[in-house]
Amino acid sequence: MEKHLEAFLVANWNQTDLSQEFLIFEEDGEAVGQQYATDAGPIDILAISKDRKKLLVVELKRGRATDVVVGQVLRYMGFVKEQIAESDQTVEGVIIALEGDKKMCWALMSVPSISFYRYQISFKLIKE
């Protein structure tokens, strides 16, 4: 399910709120931001702001996100800051999940550089 969520998000990036500011990360003109391999683990989606001043680490969870994911995102952000970002670029994180638990929300209160989004799925059958 998480891979389907990731594929859907990438395929429909331009319909998300994130696309207003960010593009999927590219190297040499090729989109490489999906499952971006790092020594800290694969980043679900790596994006860059249209003004090239921010890098964005996106972590997807198919169900409930816990405070453990905050540490995971921070690890990825640290890698991106050290290995990818230029000196004038900042690094932010986003967690996208069906829901978040209270412990995660408390952890995020101390980390303003990480945002949380809930996703919602709509499914409809149309008889023809």
Image (cartoon, grey):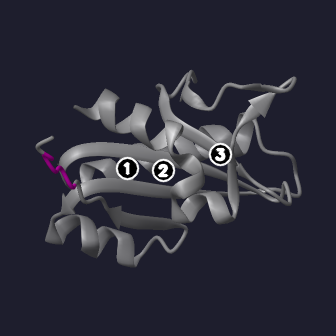
Residue 113 image point, x, y percent: 55, 68
Looking at the rendering, in which quadrant would you find the C terminus? top left
Please identify, in this view, whether the residue under mark 3 or under mark 2 is nearer the observer: 3
| In the foreground, 33 or 127 | 127
Q: Earlier in the sequence, mark 3 or mark 1?
A: 3
Residue 107 image point, x, y percent: 31, 69
Q: Which type of secondary structure does the marked residue at label 3 adopt?
A: strand
Q: Which residue is mark 3?
A: 47
Q: Amino acid at mark 2?
A: Leu
Which residue occupies 60% across, 45% down? 78
Q: CA distance from mark 2 to mark 1?
A: 5 Å
| In the foreground, 124 or 66 | 124
Q: CA distance from mark 3 to mark 1?
A: 19 Å
Q: Which residue is mark 2?
A: 74
Instruction: Judge left or right: residue 8 versus residue 21.
Output: left
Q: Earlier in the sequence, mark 3 or mark 2?
A: 3
Q: Is residue 100 above or below residue 42?
A: below
Q: Which residue is mark 1?
A: 71
Instruction: Judge left or right: residue 77 versus residue 42.
Output: right
Which residue range is magenta in the image? 122-126
